[in-house]
Image: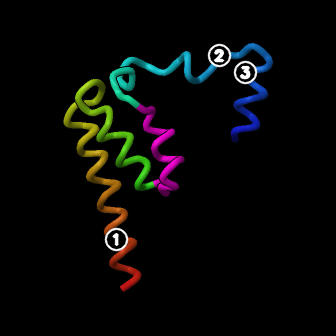
Amino acid sequence: MLRLFKQSTERGEENMNEADPDHYSNLPMEPWDFIQQNKLDFFEGNVVKYICRWKNKGGVTDLRKAITYIEKIIEGEDSNE
């Protein structure tokens, strides 16, 4: 995936960072950088993403999406018991 991103930017296609909307601009760190640095899985990463942006983008809808991913994490933990 990273290789595809690098190749697309080398060909002059739109850089994903330039296309990032303003709903992350007030944060000290991009959510995907935090997610990667902390080695979060898909569900955990989406919780972080939706919690970080809910006030500036999706409102309560984003909070509900975060809850959905938290519930998936809980389901996975319950199935491991």
Expressed as whole percent of the image width and height from the top left, the position of residue 70 reads: 31, 58
In front: label 1 or label 3: 3
- CA–CA distance in space, label 1 to label 3: 39 Å
Q: Find disc 1 in the rendering and name its residue.
A: 75
Relative depth, front residue between 63 and 32 = 32
| Farthest residue, direction front | 28
Q: Dot 2 lies on which element?
A: loop
On screen, residue 80 above or below 20:
below
- CA–CA distance in space, label 3 to label 2: 6 Å
Expressed as whole percent of the image width and height from the top left, the position of residue 52 reads: 32, 36
> Crowding at label 1, few (<14), some or many (≥20) Cα neighbours within 10 Å?
few
On screen, residue 65 above or below 9:
below
- Position of 18 with respect to 46 (left or right) is right
Q: Amino acid at mark 1?
A: Glu
Q: Earlier in the sequence, mark 2 or mark 1?
A: 2
Q: Residue at x 74, y 34 (%)?
A: 4
Q: Which disc, if any, is residue 9?
A: 3
Q: Amino acid at mark 2?
A: Glu
- CA–CA distance in space, label 2 to label 1: 38 Å
Q: Amino acid at mark 3?
A: Thr
- Location of the N terminus by quadrant is top right
Magenta residues (range): 29-42
| Farthest residue, direction bottom | 81
Q: Which disc, if any, is residue 14?
A: 2
